[in-house]
Amino acid sequence: MRTTFFVLFILMFSLFVVTLTSYTQEAPEVSERGKEVYEESCAHCHGIEGRGDGSAAENLLPRPRDFTGGVYKIRSTESGELPTDQDLFDIITNGMPGSSMPEWESALSADDRWELVAYIKTFYSGFQELKESETLPRLINLTGKVKYSQESVEIGKVLYTELGCIECHGNVGRGDGTSAPTLVDSWDYRTWPANLSQGWNYRGGSTTEDIFKRFIGGIAGSPMPAFEGDTFYHFGLTPEESKRAVELENKEEITPEDEAEYAKYSEKMENAIDAALDRAEGTELTPEAQKIYDDAMKVVYEKSWHLANYVKSLSPEKRPEYAIGNNVLRSQYKEGDLPTFDDAEWETLESSYYPLVGQVIVEPRQFNPTIDSVNVKSFYNDTEVAFLFTWDDRTNNTSVEETENFGQSFIDGLAIQFPVKVPKGPTDEKPYFLWGGRKPVYLWQWMASEPETIKELTAKGMSNAGLQEDQGNVQAESEYKEGQYRLWVKRALKTEDKKDLQIEPAVFVPIAFSAWDGANGDIDTKRAITSWYTFVLEPVPSSRRFIYPPLVALLSLGLLVGLRQFVQRKNT
Amino acid sequence: MKRVSLFTICFLIFIASWVFLKYVVGGLISVPIPNSVIAMYMALILIAILVHVSVEDTRFEEFIRPIHETLVDEKRSTRRVVLAVLIPILMLGYTYTNIAQKANPAGDPRVAHPVPPSEFILTHKDKEIGTMQEVENPYRHYEKDDPEEFKSHVENGRNVYYDNCFVCHGDHLDGKGHFAHGFQPLPANFQDPGIIPNFQESFFFWRISKGGPGLPNAGTPWNSAMPVWEEILTEEEIWDVILFLSHYTGYSYRSFGEGH
């Protein structure tokens, strides 16, 4: 008994030690190995000297990190601090979703990844200075997490407006705020605010803690500020004081008492901001200033948890399943008129999700598409089929314009592609997935400049597309709202035009998409695309399903009875 | 204790075989086995069981006794009624789910590594290079003759790769680039030991220079997102990137005369 206890104790203790050491791991001393791995695996993007200027860099947005400035977006440390070794290790290990930084866990051993951390740190002298000063970067305090609840989400939602998140991230978080098209990073490269409804693209992960850390630490080098000092609304005021200050600001007639009260708040805010500035500059704070700062940050931390819960509520937990395999788009049969653009009936259907990627096949290419996906729903009746397409686009570009800093912007658009003739089976030749080739494709092209029009095209390649002579078979209606396009399209199942696709129930039809985000420089071949997918007018379930099964059941009962009688007769 | 009847044993063996094929072999050990294959195995197992029980008359009698009893024995009437209800209900459910099942699209018949036409002349744009069987990578010989020169070709290949290919074929050449999920078929994984060692450099030259549209019909050229690289890359760039692929992965291409 005693031995068992002793063994258990030893086991528990060693587990404890292992957890402790793995949690606070630091990079080893710099070695030749780190340099070797860096040059083999990283330099083509981040550059031999770590300046973020490798040969591939030009094609990438976000750009590869320039390591020489010590500016790191994804950290567990406070604003203005360097990342911990663990932060760097985690980014190398997990990659950065939505960018071209991949995970390296499957390609490099943990030892090699630690060697890399050590080597990357040599590009910026600040890491060495920090080491010599024998201090550690200040970590973001994660205690005091507010549990996810509808109540917290509601509080966060108010903060989202109050703190000005809307200006970049837009009303419901699709990255469509008014300043979205103007943003640049610290290196003057264009950058877009995150679309918060797509958690799978959050660079630093999408757990509540991840989101919270981006608030407190900021996203260094990007326009996303850290929540501290003058970048935080009413920094230094308690929630009650903040509420009161807003009341006073909106009051029409101000009494001298009001003025005095407001002055008190202003002073409080100024003191708190001064303390934050002093602290950021490394000045030792007086005990009073420290207290002011700590009190102010306590409010910031609590509000940030609520806001993190709100942001968390904006995105589905996982990226939707792609519409591949058996998960094809199934148009649902409906008797009578098909739902119109605004009909609530669309809400009853699940969307099929089509991920888009850059068109990198034909020059000029698009290496940095901004449209993540197209979502599609469909109904059909005896004579017509209707589709509802939705896709996120941060800007509504309806004409060609000259922008201040980013050259020309073009017109947003979507094209839906079908073969002219449905292939007779999986081995039958399809048209080339990129707007056809030897075999033609039939296209519905929609452009934001004519939001109620679908043009019918026939194409035998991207450079060989033409308007059909017979137009006007397809009805369309669309809307741009809060960073999202909704496009409703309706057409007869059968048309007179031989160049049109003829649609029949229960036939699997190839379908593909192209999308253009004008603000991202998309025009012509520069676009986001999909390869071939499939849709089908899902047949109405056959009434045979109510006839055959009972018949089969009766038959099997009859067989059993017959067998019994056969055996009985044989016995007698 | 009552002896377990031969029928029960056989029944249990039959069920256990099915579970083994479906969930152990087709789940824990390997990829799921198609239902038609399982059905074939089950038919064999059924035949084996029937052969086993019918070789001796006594054994056969022992085997069918429970069936016989269930059908006619007065003492077994409860069991009889339960089965007479259960079997038709199961049949009903089975037929219903089969009829009500949604139709699914046919799978992709694609041949992953289509054979190029025999006596195939390699070209870059319109320039003839030679037959697929004879052409060698013109820079491969530097590996022995001039390692410095060889290295500069590999480095050039590296730049070509990361300027053009990695978005689909991945930073680690594992076919998991950040655009890979957008394409079907998925981009080739050069880390797969079945890729580089099985093909000659000239085959790679053909696949790179002609891309998806250059595939024979068995390769479903209409689905492949592989660009026609001869329109973008020079002949030298293509040979260099071929050098880089084997340098990075550590695999050697198949050489001439092997394996035919």
Image (cartoon, coloured by chain):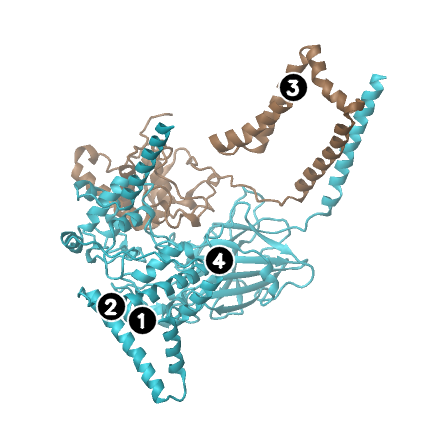
Mark drawn on residue A374: 4
Q: Residues within 10 Å of mark 2 (few under 14, many from 20)?
A: many
Mark 1 and mark 4, same subunit? yes
Q: Secondary structure at mark 2?
A: helix
Label 1 vs label 3: CA separation?
Answer: 80 Å
Label 2 vs label 4: CA separation?
Answer: 44 Å
Label 3 vs label 2: CA separation?
Answer: 82 Å
Rendered location of residue A430, percent (x, y): 52, 47
Disc 4 residue type (three-letter) = Val
Residue beneath disc 2: A276
Res A170 → quadrant: bottom left
The chain that hosts pointer 2 is: A
Mark 1 and mark 2, same subunit? yes
Disc 1 residue type (three-letter) = Phe
Answer with mark 1 or mark 2, whichever residue precedes in sequence. Answer: 1
> Do the numbered discs 1 and 2 sit on residues whose CB atoms are within 8 Å?
yes
The chain that hosts pointer 4 is: A
Q: Colour of chain B?
A: brown
Q: Colour of chain A?
A: cyan
**Relative depth, front residue between B109 and A20:** A20
In the figure, A383 relative to A237: above or below?
above
Q: Secondary structure at mark 1?
A: loop
Disc nearest the viewer among 2 and 4: 2
Residue beneath disc 1: A235
